[in-house]
Amino acid sequence: MKNPFANALNEKPEAKTSWSYALTMPVFLMFFSYLLIGSGYFSDIRTFVGATILNGFLLTCTFLIQNRVNTIIAHRYSSLNQTIQRVAVSVFVHAVLSGLFLLLIATLYVKFRWFGATVSYKSIIIVYVINMMAIVLTMVIQETFHSLGHWKHHEFNKEKLLKENIQGQLQSLKAQISPHFLFNSLNSLSTLIAEDSEKAEEFVDQMARVYRYLLQTNQSTVDEDQVNHLTSLNNELSFIESYYHLLKTRYGEGMHLTISVNEKYLSYLLPPLTLQLLVENAVKHNIIRSSRPLTVEIFSTNDGFLQVRNNLQKKNVSGLENLESTRIGLANIQAKYNLLAQNKFVVSEPVIENGPDYFIVTLPLIAKSIS
């Protein structure tokens, strides 16, 4: 496994940092050399050239080391809620590095009096204090830009997730209100009215619940403008039961749904319409007959995941063997979880297993307290 510290040490300074150093270096170098040597720095050309080269080399080495240290610390404490830790570690490390650097300077210029230097240990301490003040000021500016960068990233993900939610929900809504779906539903309703008025009334009630949930989910997403518009597992399961009632009325014994979820996970959250997309995919791409029933199972695992599983019996449509899914619904679900992972609402993404006998999707559930 690669060492992150080694990787950080091998990285080049950021372009902005390098340009800032290149622009400020000449002025700071001459000021720094004058503090160490005194008026003799400008009065003798050999002293000026020699001290400039030496001090330029020392300052550049210090800059490169401190820049690598900044990179390591930024990688180690990268999140916004680690700002205090990042600042504290940075101040301590830079204080040590500055102390070592100035100790080297003191050895060269105070003890050996290079280039006729007049600087004293007291002056070195003053330079150290000024240097630390400059470091703290620089860190304040860097943290300000760091926070702005996090905020921009957060807002970008917020808009992107909102867009994914709306697109996925509108796609689902469009599929549900398509003429084909309405025709099948109304045809089933027409048959029920003629055969069993009570079942017809229940069918209408369940159909109304399906559309109400779809419309409310889309409306709440637009109005609330949340980065993680989520719904409880309990709400999703209630919706799926209504949705399944419509499918069951149409397919009869050709369709079965089993739900086995631990009660403690009912308050957990997930992106809305996730289960509907998975059930819809199962219905769309598999044979459904009383002699070959499609069975969809929804159950929770002991480690806080939700699994949706259906037996595989792919359709043959108009001579086309094993009609393949476009995976639009699955891609939509994965995109939502990916953005939630980026915002640290989940630590894992959906796992899809397309085995020879079963199609299984494992979904992370989100604790309400985390959201």
Image (cartoon, grey):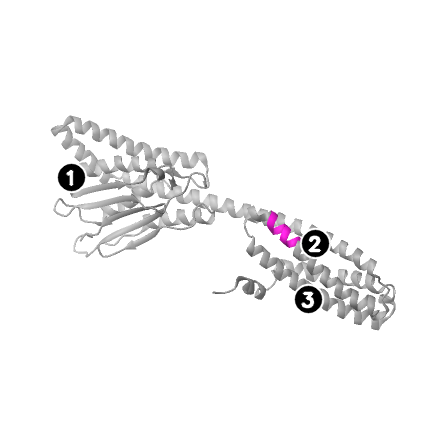
- Give residue 13's quadrant in the image: bottom right
Left or right side of 252 for 68: right
Question: Going 31% across and 50% down the picture, which residue do you hit?
Answer: 361
- Going from N to C along the chain, the mark reached first, 1 or 2, is 2
Q: Name the residue under label 3.
A: 61
Q: Mark 1 points at which residue?
A: 252
Is most of the magenta stretch helix, strand or loop? helix
Question: Going 51% across and 45% down the picture, which residue do you hit?
Answer: 154
Tell me: residue 238, above or below residue 305: above
Q: Mark 2 points at which residue?
A: 135
Question: Going 33% across and 43% down the picture, which residue do you hit?
Answer: 274
Left or right side of 223 for 215: left
Q: Give the CA separation, mark 3 to mark 1.
A: 77 Å
Coordinates of residue 131 in the picture (x, y in percent): 74, 56
Where disc 1 sits, the SS reads helix
Give the residues drawn in magenta, as a range: 84-91
Question: Going 24% across and 52% down the picture, which residue do you hit?
Answer: 358
Contact, mark 1 vs mark 2 (Cβ under 8 Å): no
> Which numbered mark, 3 or 1, is in the foreground of this view?
3
